[in-house]
């Protein structure tokens, strides 16, 4: 058991976002918790989180600074790249957006709380020449920041991409997704020994293409499914990396924190958490 | 429970709607103003024209001196109203609590408690923006906050495009460095007074306590005190919209300042408004008349009706002075709008004496006219007052 704990001591587990009112109903937050009080409560359970709102809105230094002040020094943030650089890219504007993004992120970089910049591309972002050129230019503009790139389209699952990432020390995000054609597969490929990154999106096949987050990410991982990922993906990847980050995005009905706690229990060798 | 309020704002709404009809106008200076009126003023303008110095309400001649390349378009209020309805119908899929202006591109959506069905409010706002872009060709600025005031300030900051999320608990810090001009509820005179005190930013005004604000603003001090701290408990309400629904319009085929023609228009709007009131089973207690002159200037007049009524004849008799109150310029009039500001249930008290010669007779006549209109259309029958021919005495 001790061996197991040592093996996973640099693994951080968290959820994609923390500010969900429905997690109060799910019992993760106490009744009548205000949204402002959620982050301090969240860090009682987890040591890291993904900031999702930065996908919708460019991060602002003042707001990020206030957020840093509300968490303990060891807490880490993985910050999603804004949609104007991943989903709604305008050729004439995106470089300016990168500059604004970097400025907004500055307090996190200075405080050492930045775990990674999460660049999540949509399914439509396939491995075309145009997209390859864009990706190369984007990572160049973001140079100096710890980058983790998540693809949805399976055309990016090839050795040439992995080799490029390895050379540039960019983390390829492993994803747990529904088993649908053309979706990026769950691979245990380590391209950056500094950080491996796995995102659990749930396996809701029917909800995936619904266009509604509440259906897309409505999934509760069973202990067996988490166990398989632990043995098949997390363990071999963590063995090759200094740090691992595991995030659950199946936020609907508080399933993400529940599954994250189960996985943490497994990592510490205590087995799945017992049901209340 | 903390609220989640989404504010959508289509910047330069009239121009944005015109651009969906004619994409060639995008990126060019556009001015919307009544054509053919020598003293017309700007109704709306594109961002490009605004950057050149054009502003709403500016005389058209001056606007063209500032933006000589601008394309001039006449206003089409009906088109903007249809576009507004389309915006509302998109948002109704996400919340029943929506508040909108008449044709100004502003929408407040209360998304509180909808996260289980639709996900976080920010995602709803983003999806609405995307739907409006793809299906209507409009790109609203959006914001999410815990109340209407903060949400409105946030969209003002994000304009002309983009988004702004103000997290719960961040309201005070968000407003703190902003200029006072951006805070809703502070009018021009308030700002002039504050400037006399050398106060121009929110954090500066916050240094005054409630008693000090009362000295300057009287009864409004409490609202201002809360507003600059990002507190606003006003609900997202359809009241304003419903009030607007109890209004009727009449556009003259030609701009006019002929008294008989105006009286005829007045009668038509009164008849139409009373018909709406009767169908809703309510009486009108307060009326507002809006006259739009050919140069775009509007004049308002308001009055209480005693007793409250839904009878064409009674209302017409009572509200004729309203026309003379608002008709105080020598410019011709283009548009009449009559709005029932306060609808009340009919008085349940019956008359002690049955007056068969007056009120009852009018009531029977109105009912008969209504039946004819229902069967043969709204213009099938009208009293003589509603007919005007040139040469009539004014």
Image (tube, rainbow, N blue to C red):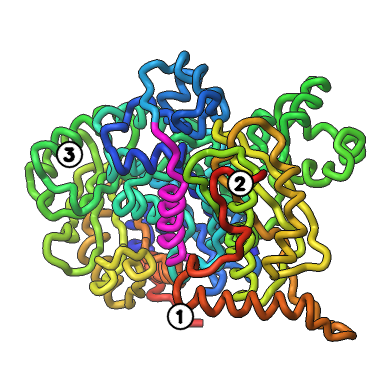
User: Which residue carries the number 2 mark?
Assistant: B392
**Residue B91 part of the magenta-drawn span:** yes
Disc 2 packing (10 Å; few <14; some 14–19; many ≥20)? few
* Circle nearer the N terminus (3, 1): 3
Q: Which of labels 3 and 2 is toward the front?
A: 2
* Disc 2 from disc 1: Cα separation: 91 Å
Task: Please provide the residue range marked out in magenta.
Answer: B73-94
**In the rendered view of the protein, which quadrant contains the C terminus of chain B?**
top right
Calculate the distance from the C-alpha at mark 3 to the C-alpha at mark 1.
40 Å
Query: Mark 2 belongs to which subunit?
Result: B
* Residues behind callouts 2 and 1 on a single chain: no
Looking at the rendered image, the quarter that the N terminus of chain B falls into is: bottom right
Which-is-in-front pick, marks 2 and 1? Answer: 2
Query: Compared with residue B195, is residue A80 higher up or lower down, i.e. above or below?
Result: below
Quote the CA–CA distance across marks 3 and 2: 90 Å
Residue A274 circle label: 1
- Between A130 and A198, the one lying in front of the other is A130
Residue B41 placed where, x, y %? 54, 28
- Residue at 33% over, 45% down: A118
- Left or right position of B82 against B250: left
The residue singled out by tag 3 in the image is: A166
Tell me residue A125's x, y (percent).
Answer: 18, 47
Query: Residue at image x 85%, y 33%?
Result: B208
Vertical arrangement, residue B101 with respect to residue B176, above or below: below
């Amino acid at each position: 058991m001790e061996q197991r704990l040592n093996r996973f001591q640099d693994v951080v587990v968290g959820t994609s976002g923390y500010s969900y009112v429905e997690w109060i109903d799910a019992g993760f937050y106490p009744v009548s918790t205000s949204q402002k009080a959620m982050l301090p409560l969240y860090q009682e359970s987890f040591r890291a989180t993904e900031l999702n709102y930065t996908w919708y809105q460019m991060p602002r230094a003042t707001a990020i600074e206030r957020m840093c002040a509300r968490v303990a020094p060891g807490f880490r943030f993985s910050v999603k790249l804004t949609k104007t650089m991943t989903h709604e890219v305008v050729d004439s504007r995106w470089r300016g957006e990168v500059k604004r993004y970097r400025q907004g992120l500055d307090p996190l970089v200075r405080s050492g709380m930045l775990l990674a910049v999460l660049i999540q591309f949509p399914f439509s972002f396939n491995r075309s020449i145009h997209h390859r050129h864009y990706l190369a230019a984007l990572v160049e503009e973001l140079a100096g920041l710890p980058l983790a790139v998540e693809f949805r389209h399976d055309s990016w699952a090839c050795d040439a991409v992995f080799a490029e990432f390895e050379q540039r020390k960019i983390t390829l995000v492993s994803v747990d997704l529904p088993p649908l054609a053309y979706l990026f597969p769950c691979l245990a490929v380590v391209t950056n020994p500094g950080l491996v990154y796995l995102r659990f999106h749930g396996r809701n096949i029917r909800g995936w293409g619904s266009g509604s987050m509440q259906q897309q990410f409505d999934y509760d991982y069973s202990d067996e499914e988490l166990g398989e990922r632990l043995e098949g993906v997390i363990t071999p990847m963590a063995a090759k990396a200094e740090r691992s980050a595991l995030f659950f995005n199946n936020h609907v009905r508080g399933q993400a924190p529940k599954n994250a706690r189960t996985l943490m229990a497994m990592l510490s060798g205590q087995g799945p958490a017992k049901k209340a | 429970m903390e609220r989640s309020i989404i504010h959508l704002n289509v910047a330069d709404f009239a121009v944005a709607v015109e651009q969906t009809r004619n994409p060639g106008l995008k990126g060019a200076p556009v001015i919307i103003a009544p054509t053919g009126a020598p003293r017309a003023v700007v109704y709306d303008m594109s961002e490009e024209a605004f950057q050149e110095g054009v502003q709403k309400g500016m005389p058209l001649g001056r606007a063209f001196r500032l933006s000589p390349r601008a394309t001039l378009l006449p206003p089409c209020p009906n088109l903007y109203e249809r576009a507004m309805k389309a915006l509302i119908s998109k948002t109704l899929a996400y919340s029943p609590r929506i508040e909108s202006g008449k044709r100004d591109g502003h929408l407040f959506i209360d998304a509180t408690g909808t996260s289980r069905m639709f996900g976080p409010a920010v995602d709803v706002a983003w999806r609405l923006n995307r739907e409006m872009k793809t299906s209507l060709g409009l790109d609203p600025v959006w914001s999410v906050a815990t109340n209407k005031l903060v949400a409105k300030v946030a969209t003002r900051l994000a304009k002309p495009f983009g988004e702004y999320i103000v997290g719960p608990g961040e309201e005070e810090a968000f407003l703190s460095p902003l200029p006072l001009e951006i805070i809703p509820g502070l009018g021009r005179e308030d700002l002039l007074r504050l400037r006399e005190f050398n106060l121009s930013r929110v954090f500066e005004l916050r240094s005054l306590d409630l008693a000090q604000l009362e000295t300057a603003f009287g009864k409004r001090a409490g609202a201002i005190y809360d507003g600059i701290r990002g507190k606003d408990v006003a609900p997202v309400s359809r009241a304003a919209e419903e009030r607007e629904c109890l209004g009727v319009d009449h556009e003259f085929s030609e701009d006019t300042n002929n008294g008989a023609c105006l009286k005829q228009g007045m009668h038509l709007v009164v008849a139409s408004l009373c018909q709406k009131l009767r169908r809703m089973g309510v009486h009108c207690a307060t009326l507002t008349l809006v006259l739009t002159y050919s140069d775009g200037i509007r004049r308002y007049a308001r009055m209480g009706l005693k007793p409250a009524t839904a009878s064409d004849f009674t209302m017409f008799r009572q509200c004729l002075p309203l026309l003379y109150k608002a008709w105080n310029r020598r410019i011709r009039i283009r548009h009449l709008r009559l709005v029932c500001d306060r609808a009340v249930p009919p008085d349940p008290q019956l008359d002690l004496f049955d007056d068969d010669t007056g009120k009852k007779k009018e009531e029977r006549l109105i009912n008969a006219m209504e039946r004819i209109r229902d069967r043969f259309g709204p213009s099938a029958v009208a009293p003589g007052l509603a007919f005007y021919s040139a040469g009539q005495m004014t």
